[in-house]
Image (spheres, coloured by chain):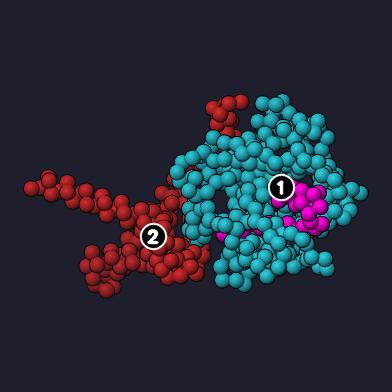
Amino acid sequence: MNKKEYLKLVKEITPKEKRLSNSLNAFLVGGILGIVAEIIKMILVSIFSITITEAIGWVLLIYIFLAALFTALGFMDDLAQKYKSGILIPITGFAHSITSAIMDYKKDGLITGVGSNVFKLAGCVLLYGIFFAFVMAIIKVILYV
Amino acid sequence: MYNFKNIYINDYYSLAGPIEKKSNLKKCDYFIEDYYFGEKTPEKAESKMQKIVIKNLIKDERPDLIIGSDLNNQLTATAMSVVDLKIPYIGHYCACASSASMLITLANFIMSKNIKKGLFIISSHTLVAEKQFRFPVEYGAPKPLRSSQTATAAVGIIVSNQESKIKIVSGLLGKVIDSGIKDVHNMGAIMAPSAVDTLIVFLNKSNTTVKDYDLILTGDLGKVGSEIFKAVLQKKYKIKINNHLDGGATLYKNFEYSGASGSAVLPLTLVTKVLTNKKYRKILYLATGTLHSTLLVNQKNSIPTLTHAIYMEVGL
């Protein structure tokens, strides 16, 4: 049995991921989170009489805070296991990754532990987010000058 | 292949975590309720688990040598747990294959009459392994179905030349094999070729067939790996085995994923399920391990794998 035959055998036996049901699950949960956010936004606008832009900022803050809180309380990872990416893709994923890294490394010291590991997972979002924002800005300058 | 004379397992002690407790592991000596076990970090908890096992095994006569292993960087947990004992120590790392290579090393020390009695300690902790090999503990990356979960357990075994029911008859150190697989989630597929290779070499060298054994016990192939292991044996060597038991595939009940992994799974299965079962007299113990690190996986190398074998007989 050569390597190619072995890889074929492995592919046959390894259980297939339920991609369709996972995506549907993530779509529904992510969608519901979006609807809830919209409702919170409308409530904020009507009760505190702030502008829609301000209300959006507050909704994001609430979501980020809840994701960090649920991570610290220890059930955010179980929710992510169950509802897949639907629960992580809204802004919650970033807060979740940072909080979980801090919790892991808090005992390793503020500089050597938390400081150097806090962006272990979220670092790539920051780096490529800033990089592509820069690229888009250059494109915009070229197109509009 | 190494043939041993008068090498016996005299005593053993096992400790396991909360999920293992739920899986009806009746013969285990001690269960911890919480992963932190009263300590501030999971590494210290793993070390405390090892300390409890060691304390229960060192009674009157102290061992001449301790050989220990875990899955942490530079065997941190083991180093912390043996520091107060004042007994010569070697750390040993062959990932999940360590249990067999450690027993073979101890047996060789005793055979050469350099020591009389040795203590073997091995542990794995799910949170420590998550942090070491995967993501931060609380990070919820959805797991694929082929992945496994590191078991939380610590097992200690006393090996000496004093006669007892359990005899270590022979051992074989396996060769490192390139599995050709880069997907670290599929550990069963990584380890299966090496389990097959060591099994075939062992059978050839000892002039036996799989039917000569009551049980062929593999480490942590999981459900996926066990199936691949049997399929390769069937297709390549026309060997069909009915007396196979895999520690990882059977440790957790109603488990959605492939099974349990970790260096303590196999010794835990041995001392809680196999040695306590009178059905099994001739046991072929195959400790399977994947020799991966995050560096090796991130640099997209195919993962090397290793299996060591031990043949043990249980008397009446």
Would residue B110 be counted in the magenta stretch? Answer: yes
Q: Mark 1 points at which residue?
A: B100
A42 in relation to A126, above or below = below
- Colour in which chain B is drawn: cyan
- Residue occupying image coordinates x 71% and y 62%: B88
| Element marked by disc 1 | helix
Q: Residues within 10 Å of mark 1 (few under 14, many from 20)?
A: many
| Residue type at tag 1 | Ala
Answer left or right for B182 relative to B51.
Answer: left
Chain letter, red in picture:
A
- Residue occupying image coordinates x 54% and y 27%: A4
B4 in relation to B153, above or below = above
Q: Name the residue under label 2.
A: A119
Frontmost residue, A2 versus B257:
A2
Extreme residue in the bottom direction = A48
| Residue type at tag 2 | Phe
